[in-house]
Image (cartoon, coloured by chain):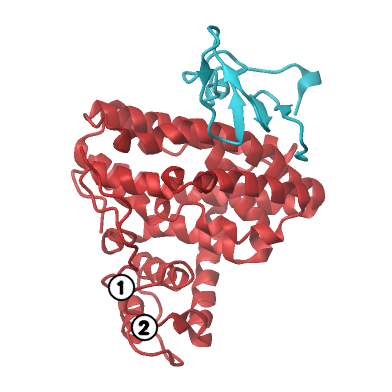
Chain colours: A cyan, B red
Amino acid sequence: MTRGPETEITSYRDGPLVVRGPIRLVDATGAEIPVRRSTIALCRCGRSRIKPFCDGTHKTSGFKTEARASG
Amino acid sequence: MTLSAAPGFAAPRLPSPAGALSDALFDAMRRPPFAMWDLPAPESDDDLHLTLYACYELGYVGFAEVDGDWEWEPSLVALRASLERRFEATLREAIDTVADAPDGTVAERLQALIAADESPSVARHLAAHGIEHELAELLIHRSAYLLKEADPHVRAIPRLPGRAKAAMVEVLADEYGGGRLEYMHSELYRQALEAFGLDGAYGAYLDRLPGVTLATVNLMSLFGTHARWRGAIAGHLAVTEMTSSDANRRYGRAVRRLGYTSREATHYFDEHVEADAIHDVVAAYDLAGGLAEAEPDQADTIVFGARALILVEGAFARHLLGAWEAGRSSLR
């Protein structure tokens, strides 16, 4: 949780990847995806309707992360 | 559709009373502060929660015709404390109607509470077959909190230990738009109200709100006001965030199905789908989990706050859905 000069990505158990710190997000064509927040959550289950961002759908789809990645 | 910019901010007028106690208090509050004696007992839940709401409101925006010194008038503080004791007693009496989750980490316990909650869902109803006036009533009920969204939680910040404090600040900063008015959630809600042709002014609908609605806000003010309830405000916020993305997706669906497609009408709900998916894990693991890690004896208070939320929100949902099913208004 400590916020240093580096961008930090936290994997939360059965949930998204949360990114804190400066980040430039681009789509497959290289076009920039606007990032307004200082903290964002990226979809990890593949089922979000607002990809690349998380919308909480992992909860209803029963998505599980492997034990080693537990947050 | 053109919308006004944020209007000049004015404190609301005192609402009409809901019983003998609120009547007596509002009468007193129109005068300069004095020691109030012999106030009647609240005659109903509506009376209790409107009076308690008004006591707390003095610490938020206040009322146009009420002297600001009433906030710390000792007899008013004593009245507030007596109403808080009544409220807390009713919570403790009814808390076992909400399933408990005694085992596991705090995050696991909160997830188990949500999974076991069998309360009806206003969001599901509205998304599937809500009609216009039901949506309008829901927006009016929620204005009691969402025009001051996150304000009750701010008071908890100094009472939280390291990791939990950082997490609370991270969530709240986002609620306040990262410091940008145009993204501040209460401001998005004001715009949504106006996009639906409703009054976006703070406190405009206080007259119309039943006790069952005001109790949902009083619960946050209670937990946010008292340091001993720091665990409860953390548990309350965590479960709110853990269930909010899904509810707001459904509200967004209802809004669009009823023909409101402007950015002003939809932004509040869409914003919460994305924002609360972040707040969800931060509040569950870092805020609630972080607090329980630093102060293990807070774990049960965290869970109590979450169960109390499920209790008052369940009563709120049953009130709205019951009134609508009977063809009545759910407002006061």
State the mark number for residue B301.
Answer: none
- Residue located 51% across and 57% down the image: B151
**Is A6 on the left-hand or right-hand side of A40?**
right
Q: Are marks 1 and 2 on the same chain?
A: yes
Distance between the alpha carbons at the discs numbered 1 and 2: 9 Å
**Is B208 on the left-hand or right-hand side of A10?**
left
Q: Are marks 1 and 2 in contact (CB under 8 Å)?
A: yes
Residue B73 screen position, x and y as percent: 50, 85
Instruction: Give the residue number, with chain letter if any, for mark 1.
Output: B14
Q: Chain of mark 2?
A: B
Q: Earlier in the sequence, mark 1 or mark 2?
A: 1
- Residue located 50% across and 86% down the image: B75
- Indicate the secondary structure of the residue bearing disc 2: helix
**Which quadrant is home to the N terminus of chain B?**
top left
The amino acid at mark 1 is Leu
The amino acid at mark 2 is Met
Above or below, B210 against B16 in this view is: above
**Is B171 on the left-hand or right-hand side of B64?**
right
Crowding at dot 1, Cα within 10 Å, few <14 / some 14-19 / many 20+, comes out as many
Crowding at dot 2, Cα within 10 Å, few <14 / some 14-19 / many 20+, comes out as some
Q: Dividing the picture into quarters, in which one does residue B125 lie?
A: top left
- Residue located 60% across and 62% down the image: B155
- Indicate the secondary structure of the residue bearing disc 1: loop
Residue A62 screen position, x and y as percent: 60, 18
Q: Dividing the picture into quarters, in which one does residue B322 lie?
A: top left
Q: Is residue B306 visible?
A: no
Residue A30 screen position, x and y as percent: 55, 10
Q: Chain of mark 1?
A: B
Instruction: Give the residue number, with chain letter if any, for mark 2.
Output: B29
Residue A67 screen position, x and y as percent: 78, 19
Q: Is residue B153 visible?
A: yes
Q: Nearer the viewer, residue B41 or B151?
A: B151
